[in-house]
Image: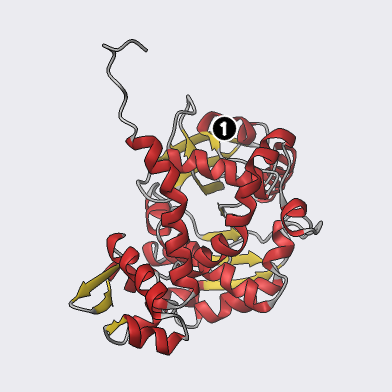
Amino acid sequence: MTKSAKIPDPAPVLDLIEAFRRSKVLFAAVTLGLFDALQPCPQDAASLAAALKLQPDPLERLLDACVALKLLNKTGSKYSNDPVATAYLCRESARALTGYILYSNDVLFRMWSHLEDAIGEGTPRWTQTFGTEASIFDNFFRTAEAKDDFLRGMHGLGLLSSDKIVAAFDLSRFQRMVDLGGATGHLALAACERYPSLHAIIFDLPAVLATTRAYMRNAGEAAKRIELLGGDFFRDDLPQGDLVTLGRVLHDWDEARIRELLTRISQRLPAGGALLIAEKIVDADKSGPLSALLQSLNMLICTQGKERTLDEYRQLLETSGFGNVQAARTGAYLDAILAAKI
């Protein structure tokens, strides 16, 4: 570079150098229960430290960082939750993302330190990180608490998109929806709320359905049209319906496993049936969106899967008994794909 050449602004690089610090502030604040403790009323750092059995000065630094991140507000010496923290960072909130934040802190933050090895070897990092051959799914179910925390996180993420997923296409012609791997039922519930004549089945592992029932008990009138059925969608007979939904399922698997599942679904669907998929869609030239590209790296670290372009999904669908593949960018956390049985 010559002396006359303009020196590039280092801001993007400096921002990325510090990016993990912002994430870790959020993770630590949720793990320590700061937002839950502040929800009843504002407190100063000393009072909060005493309540949480923490050191006042270090806690004050964390609190001030949360203020700068616009998660907390500060009036005088007292801190209070910003509305965004009340909605997403308190465990008792219906829209809490705390389960996924705790999972990100306890699991993903550690696994991402081995990204270089994942790229070099092309395999997940569970054994390297935790010294076990257990898979991501084994980790989710290692204890009842771990299962509930993870499902709570998936529920919070699901609520960000479910309403828009079921509104992306006109689904009013369908009578019976089968939500495979439906977890807490947020997608099935959103569909039944939008389409009053629709009935749904949530099909998931029996261990998951124990948590699903707790969510359905407080879900309102639409939940009365939702049935829960236990099973493994790779091994057990699939329930009968004219619309099957898959929310954040396909990105977990490689192409062979996806074709196996899609073929099972196609063979089970009646004439006129369709499949609705909720996933992040990568741009055709793979230049974005950034969240999808980062999630694809996350799948490399954790699973055998990845995020895909619409053309990649179309190829998988068309070789598994589907056609007329349509996609909709929802503007939410996930996008929507609808494919008809042929």
Q: Is residue 198 visible?
A: no
**Quadrant, the C terminus:** top right
Front-lying residue, 205 or 83: 83
Image quadrant holding the N terminus, namely: top left
| Residue 286 x %, y % | 49, 28
Determine the residue positioned at 44% across, 43% down: 17
Residue 339's place in the image compared with 54, above or below, is: above
Q: The residue tagged with tag 1: helix, strand or loop?
A: helix
Indicate the quadrant where residue 222 lies.
Answer: bottom left
Which quadrant of the view contains residue 106? bottom right
Crowd tier of the residue under label 1, counting other residues whose Cα lies within 10 Å: few below 14, some 14–19, many 20 or above: many
Please name the residue that numbered disc 1 is placed on.
314
Image quarter for residue 38?
bottom left
Q: Is residue 317 left or right of residue 217?
A: right
- Number of labels in the image equals 1
Above or below for 224 versus 239: below
- Would you say residue 282 is visible in this rendering? yes
Q: Residue shown at 43%/48% (left/top)?
A: 19
Is residue 4 left or right of 18 when viewed as pictured?
A: left
Residue type at mark 1 is: Arg
Q: Is 40 placed above or below 186 here?
A: below
The picture places residue 159, in percent across and down from the top left corner, at 42, 63
Q: Is residue 226 above or below residue 166?
A: below
